[in-house]
Image (cartoon, rainbow, N blue to C red):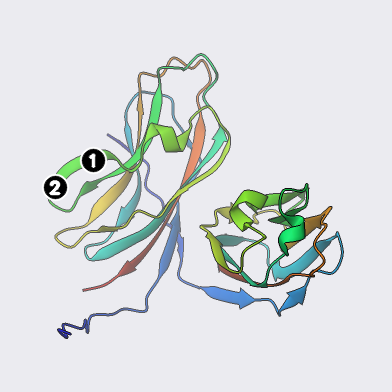
Amino acid sequence: MIISLTSKSDDNLRVTRSGAVTLSADETYALVKVPMNAFILGVWLHKTTAFDAADEGTSGTLTLGFIGNGEDADVDYFMSDETVDSDATGIVTHDGGKHFSAAGGYITITRTINDSTVSPVVQVFVAYTVIS
Amino acid sequence: MVNILANRAADNFRLMRSGKITIDADDTYAVVKVPKKAFVVAVWLEILTAFDDQSTDGSLTVGFSGNGEDADPDYFMADAVSLPLVLGMKEVTKGKWFGDASGLITVTADDNDSVVNPVIRVWVMYSVIH
């Protein structure tokens, strides 16, 4: 066995939540700001109002991602449209795994080409630890 | 209803991260030490440099040794989850309680034909609970 043990650890924890956000346009919404060196432990998307049936089977999507960290934005890093299941209310989760080691950033939700007659309402919860 | 409610709880929390580790041999690498009574909540494997596509038979797994048990090199992550040819973060939420003794989180490389030495980093989240 090769021993390559780490001494890097931290015990801080923060859970942030967005407000209840109405997604009224096809746009990317920055919902939660995360600091540099934040490691995302989990992301929860609570859909209190879903897209209506008019969106079913169309090309409309709702995805959860990030911008920042000196990288190109990745609008579906945490949740693809399939995971979000935008036609249903309720909570969907992702188990994180993103280190903002180079710069701070934002957790984003992106709506595209949606034919729904209802503007969905969502709330995002993000858990992270700052570890350098 | 039978009431057998738990009164064991803990509110401590620790996130460990390994350094960047170059996998330059088929071996088991001990990357994170966890104390006795640690309940591992989640493990992430970050592949910073992937195996190249010649390593089709190779595997990269995440497991543990310790706790008075036989080592289990793919307890947390089998090759199908770690996807050693693919860059990026791989995650598992499989729990493990080190109730009997402390232990090590390990990464094991096997049968690797890659001409590139992959570079990985491991993140481990746990709570110590008695």
Front residue of this view, candidates A50 and B30: A50
In this figure, what is the number of numbered marks? 2
Image quadrant in which the C terminus of chain A is located: bottom right
Q: Position of residue B43 (x, y in %)?
A: 41, 52
Residue B102 — which label? none
Q: Tell me if label 1 and label 2 are in contact, CB under 8 Å.
A: yes
Q: Secondary structure at mark 1?
A: strand
Front residue of this view, candidates B38 and B91: B91
Q: Position of residue A19 (x, y in %)?
A: 71, 80
Numbered disc 1: what chain? B
Numbered disc 2: what chain? B
Q: Secondary structure at mark 2?
A: strand
Q: Is residue A104 visible?
A: no
The 10 Å Cα crowd at callout 1, few under 14, some 14 to 19, many 20 or more, is some
Q: From this view, report whether residue B36 is shown above or below residue A77.
A: below
- Gap between marks 1 and 2, in whole Å? 8 Å
Asked where in the image residue A15 lies, by quadrant, the reply is: bottom right
At x 47% / y 17%, what residue is drawn?
Answer: B55
Three-letter residue code for mark 1: Asp
Asked where in the image residue B3 lies, by quadrant, the reply is: bottom left
At x 51% / y 33%, what residue is drawn?
Answer: B119
To which residue does mark 2 refer?
Answer: B69
Asked where in the image residue B108 lies, by quadrant, the reply is: top left
Three-letter residue code for mark 2: Glu
At x 83% / y 57%, what residue is drawn?
Answer: A115
